[in-house]
Amino acid sequence: MKSLKTLLTTITSIIVIVVALGSTLLAYAFARDAALKLVEAELDATTVLSAKYIASEIDTDMGVLKALALRDTLKDSSIPWNEKISDLVNVLEQDETRLIYGFSDEKGNAHLTNGDTMDISDEEFFKKTQKKNLFVTDPKESHLFPGEMVVIYSVPVLDDAGKFFGCLFLEKNAKFLSERMNDVHVSDGANLFM
């Protein structure tokens, strides 16, 4: 009888242990699955929020550039280049992420807020702007600031008849993208990156 009792106790103990382990593993699997779905949903929402945040930053900079392009100082061919550029220098100083403004004639001969001139006629942003399009480049290395990643915004400047008069452009440090991503809080110890 003792051996039967021992056998039944052993079998019952094994069944209890197997059921306990099985239910623990099932609970872990369900909890893990639920946690992953929750994290995925939150990351999707954070991604959308981050994209909207960056888009609003780009829209703000583009809005400033469009407003500048409407100024008579830029559209008036009787106003000398140095006056046009000094007007842009005042705006440049309002935001340290804005590295340089430039304004070109219809052929791509640009004058910059640092006093330099350059030919931008072969640049993609100039070609797009020449066709009266607004344009924002992907982050790329600056020709003017070696080693700096920049985003270039450009808008057409049109004369009173609506004819392309020149290209107004802004070279902005691309670090603002990373800084804006760091402003988005996902969870403790987690950061977004681009």
Image (cartoon, helix red, strand yellow):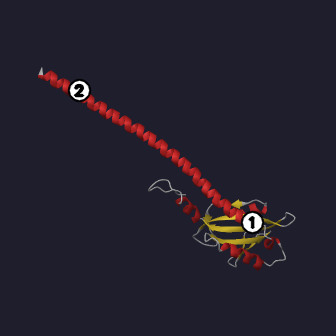
Residue 137 lies left or right of residue 15; in this view the side is right
- The amino acid sitting under disc 1 is Ala
Residue 25 lies left or right of residue 178; in this view the side is left
Q: Residues within 10 Å of mark 1 (few under 14, many from 20)?
A: few
Above or below, 187 relative to 11: below
Name the one closer to the observer, 138 or 24. Answer: 24
Residue 177 in sight here: yes
* Residue extending farthest left: 2
Provide residue 34's location: percent of width, then percent of height: 45, 40
What is the distance, in whole Å, between disc 2 and disc 1 at their CAs? 82 Å
Q: Residues within 10 Å of mark 2 (few under 14, many from 20)?
A: few
| Label drawn at residue 12 | 2
Q: Residue 97's image quarter? A: bottom right
Q: Report the residue at 44% width, 55% height from top.
A: 188
Name the one closer to the observer, 126 or 62. Answer: 62
- The answer to whether marks 2 and 1 mark residues whose Cβ atoms lie closer than 8 Å is no
Residue 123 in sight here: no
Residue 59 lies left or right of residue 189; in this view the side is right
| Label drawn at residue 13 | none
Q: Residue 79's image quarter? A: bottom right
Q: Can you say which quadrant of the picture contains the N terminus?
A: top left
Q: Report the residue at 15% width, 21% height from top.
A: 4
* Residue extending farthest top: 1
Q: How many marks?
A: 2
Provide residue 186's location: percent of width, then percent of height: 50, 53
Above or below, 102 relative to 4: below
Q: Report the residue at 60% width, 56% height from top.
A: 53
Query: Which residue is disc 1 drawn over?
Result: 67
